[in-house]
Amino acid sequence: MKKKNMNRDKYKILKVLITEDVIDQRKISQLTKFSLGKVNNLLKELNKEKYISSNYALTSSGKEYVKSHHPQQATILAAGYGLRMVPINTEEPKGLLEVHGEPLIERIIKQLHEVGITDIKIVVGFMKEHYEYLINEYDVDLIVNSYYSTRGNVYSLYLAKDRLANGYIIPCDIWFKDNPFSTLEDPSWYLFSDKMTSHSHWQVSKSAKIKYTKNPGNRMIGIAYLNEYDARKLNDRLGKMIDAKMYDSFWEDALTCKKQFLINGRIIPNSEHAEINSYEELMELDSHSDHLKTEAIEIIEDTLNIDKTKIHNIHTLKKGMTNRSFSFECNNKRYIMRIPGQGTDKLIDRKEEYDVYQQIKDEPYTENILYLNPVNGYKLSEFLENTRNSDANDWNDVTKCMKLLRRFHHENYQVNHKFDIWKQINFYESLRDAPSAYKDFMITKENVVKLKSFIQDNIKQWSLCHIDANADNFLIDKKGKIYLIDWEYAGMQDPDLDIAMYAIYAGYNREQFDRLIDIYYQNDCDEVTRYKIYAYAAVGGLLWSNWCEYKQSLGLDFGAYSIAQYRYAKKYSKLVLNYLEKKNA
């Protein structure tokens, strides 16, 4: 049977009547902020419509209305990384962060139970196993978003699209002082706070209508209630967004259309809730939370000899291909903390990285390392102020990079380990535990392997090489000083490999590649060396292509970069083989 929806003002009166034990018109006026005259008229209408009796008690019709408008279910979104939560999110997903000894998601579940909602599903992804205990503890169900690393919460909600009607949508990283849920809901609503922020352009009017504004709007909290009608509209919008592959969108984008918000707004005081999106927000809400005691924070405290309360302005840096890093300030100085990423322990020997930094630690062109753990790879370094990444398309920058690279190679550092690129190709291939997605992979690999003897016969120098000498790892400050950072892959190798690595990461074509070689060799590169560098482009392309396929098996996708690397393996292996065939004819 279709539900009968009630006038919003009468609904507010009815909600007060079922939630307050002792009631009179004056108290109703205080709670609803309606005038006494308006309260009196609304009560008369509710009585006339047979929802309440003359003493404000619910009639049978009123009880039926309340029963039919009781929320039925809730969906909690808990799949994302919570990138802004570094360094906490390296050990626990954000929904399980504890505030005053209670995990955020458990508090939400308990508050739902208080209003009789037990049909609860949680969309999980990152560290999904950590949420498994909730199944037995609270009789909830889990929905797994297997694409959590590449598809945002709009996809998470899409996975739960069939259960949104008469239910709540709730983010997992929110804390409420008082229970925000109710035994009675009628109009759909989205929750805002009374705090105005430039991050929102939606303003809630006194009539609960949500209007677009170019000025700061009400802070969006992330909770919504949807009735059947609005759930159908939202489902339709979600489906269109997924068909259009709008995976980077927030689910709230499905509530908006041409600067119109599809449902009404509800406002609560900003002091009544806390959205915990960062380490500092958790610190502010509960400075004694056990989750503030992460390994990364303890390293910072011990190394800098400070208390965690001195750590400020934590910012997640651009998520790297291998690591998760964050910058922070302490005593008016900035630092960077590196936390090794997923699967890194299989890819990098941290003891070898430690040995490399011990060799180059006094060089003025690398970062100042304050702490480096040779076992797990945690690294603390001073932030290089007023620097930028070099630009592989700016040939002035490229010239500076090659000059520094040549200087480093000429210093001829020696360590006790080598970067065996052939071994690494096979190693990365074995890690993915499945055939390559490229149909002609075995042909390409065979062509690349044919280059091995040509390369080995023409190595002129064997010294410490960076291996990952791409443009992003060269930093240039405002005075033009240049640095080379992130020596994770460094080992003994042919310096010409570093030149090729720079080229293939930059996506250079043949003409650009030749220009790079000429800059490094100062226009004095012989033909055989040039083709050996081409050969390294093929070998490096296959290496990083295998690396990308392994990372993709972990749910990490590097898009066009992975295809570009495979193309280098195909194109340049054929180029060098043709050259050798003509030369040996």
Image (cartoon, rainbow, N blue to C red):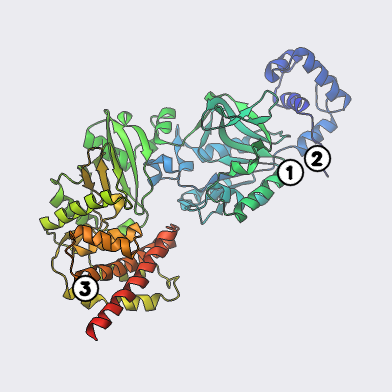
Residue 95 rendering spot, x and y as whole percentages: 49, 42
Instruction: Determine contact: label 1, label 2, CB under 8 Å.
Output: yes
Residue underneath mark 2 = 3
**Residue in the picture at 60% in, 26% down:** 268
Is 287 situated left or right of 187 in this image?
left
Comparing marks 3 and 2, which lies closer to the viewer? 3
Residue 17 rendering spot, x and y as whole percentages: 74, 24
Q: Could you tell which of marks 3 and 2 lies nearer the N-terminus? A: 2
Residue underneath mark 3 = 455
Q: Could you tell which of marks 3 and 1 lies nearer the N-terminus? A: 1
Occupied quadrant, residue 555: bottom left
Comparing marks 3 and 1, which lies closer to the viewer? 3
Kind of residue sitting beneath label 2: Lys
Is the residue 554 above or below the residue 484 in the image? below
Is residue 91 visible in the rendered image? The answer is no
Kind of residue sitting beneath label 1: Glu
Is the residue 44 above or below the residue 536 in the image? above
Kind of residue sitting beneath label 3: Ile
Occupied quadrant, residue 70: top right
Q: CA distance from mark 1 to mark 2?
A: 9 Å
Residue underneath mark 1 = 228
Occupied quadrant, residue 381: top left
Is the residue 89 above or below the residue 30 in the image? below
Q: Secondary structure at mark 1?
A: helix
